[in-house]
Amino acid sequence: MEGCDILTQPRCIKYLQRQSSPTGVALAEDEFILHVEGTARTQRVVRHIGQTSWPGRLTLTNRALYFEASKAVSYEDALKLDLSRPDVDHRVNAGSTGPWGAPLFDKAMIYESTQLSEPVVLEFPELTGSTRRDHWLALTKEVIFLHRFLSKFQIEPPLRAWEVQARTILGIFRLHAAREMLRISPPVPSSFLIFYLFEELPKGDYVLEELSNSLGGTDAMHPCSATLILKRLNISHRVVEDAEVKEGLEGPAGGVTESLVSLETTIGQARERRRSLSWRRRASKGSKRKELLIELLSPLNQVLPWFQRILSWENPLITLVVLTLSMLITYKEWIGYALATFLLLGVIEMLRARHKKMAEKCNEIVVSTSSEQTTMESIVSAQHGLNNFHAAVQKANIAILKIWSIVVSRAPKHANSVMLVMAGAAVLLMMVPFKYVIMATTLLFFASNSKAGKSMSDEQSNRRLREWWDSIPVIPVRIVSDGMTS
């Protein structure tokens, strides 16, 4: 029972309970305020609409986000962004804002959804960093992921659904309390937010599935449940009063115990996977240098943009022409043997690289940072879109380094898998009439990049593929300037 008494009523909970409802809005019976900013006693929140800016009050509840533009002595009616609708595609991302719409300061949160004609841009001004924006971004995503979890796993019984919401609310309150105590170095939000953490954690979807299974026997509340802890904090739901008679039950049933054990096992596996991937991510520290991208992609700097425009269907007419030509070329069956030979040569080259122990010889890639531009010219050229450019460069560098890591067998397990797939594909291409294979492959490849193909993609399979890709180690990168040798 000690764990139930750890959380008392901190100042943040009392402060939130004293907050008034958003102007012109009646909160639902099970809706509670979780965070507020933009009032006279808190820091400013600004909404940007085109080139105009509107300060106001921003309120987050366990169901929606409300923004009220400031008037002389009060607020206008609140703009409601409903985060609880599972049929709406919610997208919340970090963004940059500035005077007259110029993207100068990376302190904004951009909310987009299919129910809005244009995105809602909210800025959280502060002198240094973007801690406030990151905090609001994490809380908003947590609420979205909460309702997505309830909808995906069809958690319909009121008491079970409220228990899930109570755990989320409790995690947000604990995050507020931790930020209140650690103002100089605020804690990472993912340490307190359940769904925000497991949406980002490798195999986190397995943990969420086990969590839904563990809720199967929570029709009766136990003394340390999140529902009863919130009730002691004067935050309660009507279903809690209906279930009051079941509060005294002793312990969960055997089936629930097994579910909890399975949940703990899955969480442990996810933590181990996260720790095993952490050092690989640290090895990618220098991979966002643009000099590295130029060095790696120098032969492809002309072909790649043109190829990407075709695949993204930016010009449907050109894409259809390329697709038609590709289908016509499939009648030349000798291309199948050529591709089979190319794949087998790739397998042979990878085996040769492993035999010569190139993974040990190629421990790093040396990139020169020298430039013919002056310092001022470099600053001016990097002034526009620097953050987005660095993010794109980092992704491209990591992708190429991982491919190179597979080629030289720095990751033997991944290299073996790739070689088996390549060899199997080579055998398939030699046995099956190639024109049928290439026609099906071409159609599938182009269709998967269309809007209809993206809507039919398998989310779980794509997630497994991304996790397999993230587990590939990258070759360490050492940046040197002229006059230094490897």
Image (spheres, rainbow, N blue to C red):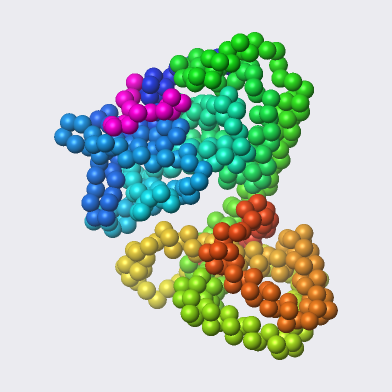
Q: Looking at the picture, does residue 200 appear above or below residue 16? A: below
The residue lying at 59 percent from left, 85 percent from top is 325
Quadrant (top left/top right/bottom left/bottom right) for the N terminus: top right
292 relative to 406 in the view: left or right: left
Q: List the single residue furthest toward the left.
A: 72
Q: Does the magenta stretch mainly form a helix, a strand or a loop?
A: loop
Q: Looking at the picture, does residue 76 appear above or below residue 166? A: below
Give the percent coordinates (x, y) of residue 479: 53, 64
Q: Looking at the picture, does residue 340 appear above or below residue 195? A: below
Q: Foreground: 321 or 74?
A: 321
User: Can residue 115 be seen?
Assistant: yes
User: Can residue 1 be seen?
Assistant: no
Residue 26 part of the magenta segment:
yes
Residue 225 part of the magenta segment:
no
Give the percent coordinates (x, y) of residue 42: 30, 31
Residue 365 placement: quadrant: bottom right
- The residue range painted magenta reads 18-32
The residue lying at 25 percent from left, 39 percent from top is 69
Residue 485 placement: quadrant: bottom right
Q: Foreground: 364 or 314?
A: 314
Q: How many marks?
A: 0
382 relative to 76 in the view: left or right: right
Give the percent coordinates (x, y) of residue 406: 71, 65
The residue lying at 57 percent from left, 39 percent from top is 151
9 relative to 58 in the view: left or right: right
Residue 191 placement: quadrant: top right
